[in-house]
Image (cartoon, grey):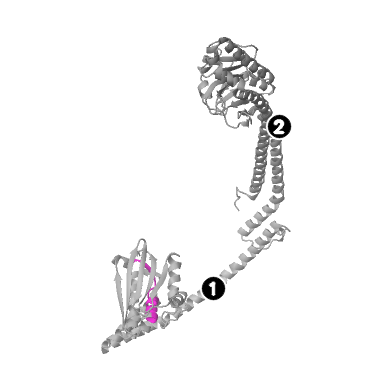
Amino acid sequence: MRKNSHSIRLKIVIWAVGLSLVLALFIATTSYILSMRYLKENQHQSALTNIHVLGNNIDSNINTVMTFSNWICLDSTINNYVQSVAETYTEDKILGRKLSMMTWNHLNNEFNIVGVRNYVDRVVISTIDGKNFLQDISGGGASSSSNTPQMIMASSFYEPLISSPSFSWYGICKNPMSKSGNPPIIPIIRAIYKADSSEVLGWVYMDIPVSVIIDSLKSFVFENDDALYLTFPEGVSYRYDGRSFVKDSLPADLVTYTLPETGWKLSYLPSESALKARMKLYLALIILIFTVILFAGIILSLSLHRIITRPVSKLIDRLDQIGLGDFSRDPSIEWPNELGEIGIGINSLSQNVSDLMEKRILDEKTKHDLEYQVLQSQINPHFLYNTLNTIKWMATIQGSEGIADMSTALSRLMKNISKGTESVIALEDEFALLDDYFTIMKYRYGGTIELEYDTEDEALLKCRINRFSLQPIIENSIFHGIEPKGSAGKIVVHTYKNDDKLFIDVTDNGVGMTKETIDDVLSGKAKSSNEFFRQIGVSNVNERIRYTFGEEYGMHITSEVGSFTTTTLILPLKYM
């Protein structure tokens, strides 16, 4: 026996190692994914906790500043100042100075009490036109620089903030009090309205130094590749670079916490290097698991190789012996396991082959005997053919043309039965056989039946058809259609093609058939009145067509009771 390169031993090794490899890869991949998810979730939760604490601290400080700005906008003393200071100065400058000093002291006391000096560098209260104002600086003291309101009103943030119907943020801006714009600030501008009115009397300006927020971040430990972002409610975002805030867009995968009071968002981008450092330990463990599983698979494959190799080799040797003609039984391959069952099967197979060979010899002898009997059975058709031929000549001599026609037709039929060996013939030959058969039937029914051919293309007469396919259908038309009618009848054979198929419609104008009768005819249950073709019924024709040409071919019957019956044969368009 030829040695197969794809032996079962090789397959066992491949399957065992491959399965172990797949299992190891699956476990390693799953462990890696779960580990990464756990580490990321842990890092995310840790970052969220840190920025939560940091954000609440910033939010508390800024909320104190917001509360102080609300107090300024609602305080009656300050409201009275911005409402009457211009008129007071016009009437009496001394009274105007007293009003300004009294209001400034009132502001300064509150500035000290609420404790916002650590978060606000400058507070400016001004009339709407900027001509009269008060200023308090966190370093202490007042300032009377006449252009302070104009510098604020000329800044880019003034108009958006003063015109905002509610408290809003502009983001981190350049300091309008400094030519260089440093240090950067977060400005607050609130409109001061007249009591019980929507009339704007003035405004309050406060600047929060960015250093206040930066000082709060000193307790936060940063890695080399992480980042912290501050986003204001209006959508402006800044990235903290370790020293200051730089305007920047937000990346993906951020851990974000929204400050509840201010609406600011503090976002943190976790460090990838820290995550990778933690992942190294997990990867080492995953690689160890992968190696152990793969090593176990190799050991398993080697063990199976040893257990199966010897009995399989013995089975192969036994098959080689059977191939050389040794069909004797070998009990040594019938082990008490699954391979032993194969050995039992091989022994049974060899015994069956031996028995089959003996039976084949006996069958060949029987076949020769049957062929001789068939040869003997052909004597009767030949004898009948010669006898009919003699009757034909006697009828011709005596002038009996009907007898001559019938005997001629019957003799030709018997000749085809005795000599015809081909199962598939040309359609024109099948029509010739049908003519002989119909001649006999026409005389039998006293000339009351008529057969007509309608062939669309003469070339179709060369198409292939099963021998004796149309005679049983004509017989069915006569027996089930025309004979019960009790009067003359006509049968039309219409031949045509469609695409790559040949169609033959046999239509009679008889009484038609019910669905039950059609089913009986197609199933072979219906009995024919003509004993000549009793072994080749309509159902047999359908089976022979399908057996010869395929399941897509065959026949079907359509009928209308009292009108007609059409039997359609469907054949492949193949020529002889």
Tell me if residue 537 comes above or below residue 137 in the rendering. Answer: below
Horizontal side, residue 457 vs residue 112: left or right? left
Q: Viewer-proximal residue, 569 or 195?
A: 195
Task: Indicate which disc residue 121 carries.
Answer: none
Which residue corresponds to the image point at 41% horizontal and 79% vertical from the top-left? Answer: 533
Amino acid beneath label 2:
Leu
The percent coordinates of residue 481 (x first, y second) are 37, 80
Which quarter of the figure has residue 133? top right
Q: Which residues are magenta?
A: 462-480
Q: Which residue is mark 1?
A: 365
Between 327 and 226, which is closer to the camera in this rendering? 226
| Structural distance between the alpha carbons of marks 1 and 2 | 82 Å
Is residue 180 at all visible to an observer of this figure? no
Outermost residue to the front: 91
Q: Which residue is mark 2?
A: 281
> Is residue 351 placed above or below 243 in the rendered structure?
below
Q: Is there any visible trace of residue 363 in the rendered image?
A: yes
Q: Nearer the viewer, mark 1 or mark 2?
A: 2
| In the image, residue 465 lies in the stretch drawn in magenta | yes
| Quarter holding residue 408 | bottom left
- Dividing the picture into quadrants, the one containing residue 204 is top right
For this orientation, the residue located farthest to the right is 336
Q: Residues within 10 Å of mark 1 (few under 14, many from 20)?
A: few
